[in-house]
Image (cartoon, rainbow, N blue to C red):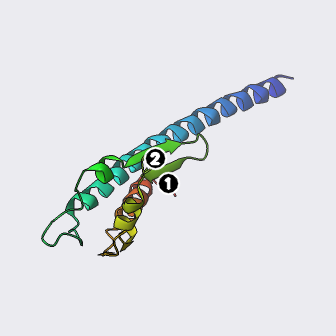
């Protein structure tokens, strides 16, 4: 009977250890996701601040009122499956998308894309890869 009791205790110990390791891994994943969101947000802002305007020749950024720049936001949600979003999540105007992806203004002028959100996505994937997260 002693062997059975010992195995039961061993199993409980292993289950406790497994739960601790899972909690630590989840905590590390959440921290990495948060870092990825912060880096993605910073990257998008750098792109906005350093991409030459296609509407004002010689202007070395896409900042006019600052609204597109300051409206960028990031969220990290979920517990087991973590979701990271960077973009204009709460405050968005149509021209933000036109500036980012290219297109025409409401008066018909061509806008060269700046690809701020694509750059943010690339940077977030790099940070996640550095943390061994897919």
Q: Position of residue 123 (x, y in %)?
A: 36, 59
Q: Is residue 42 visible?
A: no
Return the mark for residue 33. 2
Label 2, secondary structure: give it.
helix
Q: Residue furthest right?
A: 1
Q: Is residue 107 above or below residue 33?
A: below
Q: Nearer the viewer, mark 1 or mark 2?
A: 2
Q: Is residue 32 above or below residue 132?
A: above
Q: Is residue 114 visible?
A: yes
Q: Position of residue 43 (x, y in %)?
A: 30, 56
Considering depth in this image, is 79 or 101 the residue closer to the camera? 101
Between discs 1 and 2, the one toward the N terminus: 2
Q: Position of residue 110 (x, y in %)?
A: 32, 77
The residues tagged by marks 1 and 2 sit, at their Cα atoms, a distance apart of: 9 Å
Q: Residues within 10 Å of mark 2 (few under 14, many from 20)?
A: many
Label 1, secondary structure: give it.
loop
Q: Quadrant of the N terminus?
A: top right
Residue occupying the point 41% across, 63% down: 97
Left or right: 76 as drawn, with respect to 51: right
Left or right: 12 as drawn, with respect to 65: right
Residue occupying the point 45% across, 45% down: 90
Q: Position of residue 4 (x, y in %)?
A: 83, 27
The residue beneath circle 1 is 133
Q: Quadrant of residue 105?
A: bottom left
């Amino acid at each position: 009977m002693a062997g059975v009791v010992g195995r039961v205790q061993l199993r409980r110990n292993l289950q406790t250890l497994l739960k601790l390791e899972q909690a630590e891994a989840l905590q590390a994943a959440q921290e990495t996701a948060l870092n990825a969101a912060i880096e993605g947000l910073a990257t998008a802002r750098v792109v906005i601040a350093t991409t030459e305007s296609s509407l004002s020749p010689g202007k070395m950024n896409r900042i006019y009122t600052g609204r597109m720049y300051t409206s960028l936001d990031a969220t990290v949600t979920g517990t087991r499956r973590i979701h990271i979003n960077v973009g204009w999540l709460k405050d968005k105007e149509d021209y933000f998308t036109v500036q980012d992806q290219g297109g025409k203004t409401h008066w018909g002028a061509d806008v060269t894309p700046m690809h701020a959100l694509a750059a943010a996505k690339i940077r977030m994937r790099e940070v996640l890869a550095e943390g061994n997260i897919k």
